Image: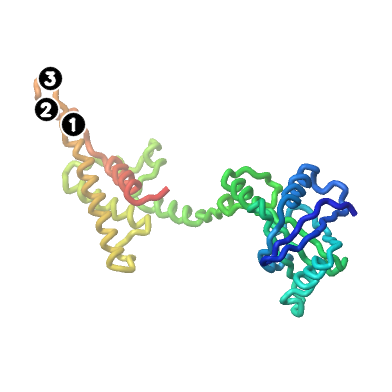
Amino acid sequence: MNHKFTTSIYDFGKTINDVQFWSKQSNYNSDEYIDNLSNCLSSSSCEYFTYINYTKLPIYLINGHSFQIFTNDEDTESYFKQKVIVTPDSNKEQDYGILAKIKNNSNKYLIFYFNKGDQTINCLILDLDTITKVQKLILDNDFDDNTFITTKKSTRNTPDTNIFDKVLKQKQKNNPFLRTTSSFNSPNSNNLSLSILSTQDQINNAINKLILSGLRIRGLSTNQAKSVNEKLKIKEIHQMTYKAAIFSLRKYNNNLLDGTNKRLELEKPQIKFNDVQETIETLLHLFVDVE
């Protein structure tokens, strides 16, 4: 056994002297650690704080192994018998000790407890600075893969949407009003997607059908709405998309002008079904979809 340092305990106006810290280790953690702790406890005392169940302490808060406590003072011996060996809940066979705060260090505490195996009074150093260090490591995402520290932020479960993607893909195949990339890149494009919309009624009808189809694919249908508020919101999205589409397609009605300010009818852009479809999908993606 090696004597490390001696301190005192202040307990409600009474000073408990000659509290000796002994260790079986010749080098406890490091000489610097012992020197700092020895200087802190030798120049000041610790103050009784409360009773604590030391068996429920988080391991990462305990700074090293325990010390054994000895004394040559009869009053100190009597104090530990009354405070530590005979605790308020000793008859319940619960492991309680006393928590004492080191006066010159706001985040370090001493825990004195009775070791039933060795029949000795032991002491643990509780370092609450560890909590701040762990929180900083988690916030900075700066810890090793083999550490005991884990963070829920990096383990968020990603929902499996494969089944929904399959259903959506199947509906897109069976729905002539939904734009698919392959249908426009292929030389054998669908006749409907390449058809020319020559009248305003055809344009309005195509816009309306494409909006309803796009909303239905996204699960927004007035027939399936469960409340009046949901129906109103769906109608509001429909009207907003319809007006925006009409406004967006006005560019096709602006004829090009030559130097003599004569309208060039041959150069007037033609509205194709896939132009309307692309406009509607862009608007719905902007108004409804969340990435």
Residue 66 showing in the rendered view: yes
When asked about the image quadrant of residue 233, the answer is bottom left
Query: Looking at the image, which residue is at 12% across and 19% down?
Result: 259
- In which quadrant will I find the N terminus? bottom right
Give the residue type at disc 1.
Lys
Residue found at the far right of this picture: 1
Q: Badge 1 is on which residue?
A: 268
Residue contact at pointers 1 and 2, CB within 8 angstroms? yes
Q: Residue at x 47, y 56 (%)?
A: 164
CA–CA distance between discs 1 and 2? 9 Å
Residue at which label 3 appears? 259
Question: For mark 2, what is the residue?
Answer: 263
Of residues 134 and 256, the one nearer the viewer is 134
Where disc 2 sits, the SS reads loop
Q: Is residue 43 left or right of residue 227?
A: right
Viewer-nearest residue: 127 or 221: 127
Residue density around tag 2, few if under 14, some if 14–19, many if 20 or more, within 10 Å: some
Considering every residue shown, the one lying at the far top of the view is 259
Q: Position of residue 131 (x, y in %)?
A: 63, 53
Residue in front for this viewpoint, 274 or 162: 162
Residue visible at 37% across and 59% down in the picture = 219
> Is residue 61 in view from this perspective?
no
* Mark 3: amino acid: Gly
Instruction: Of the two numbered discs 1 and 2 on the same chain, state the one appearing first in sequence.
Output: 2
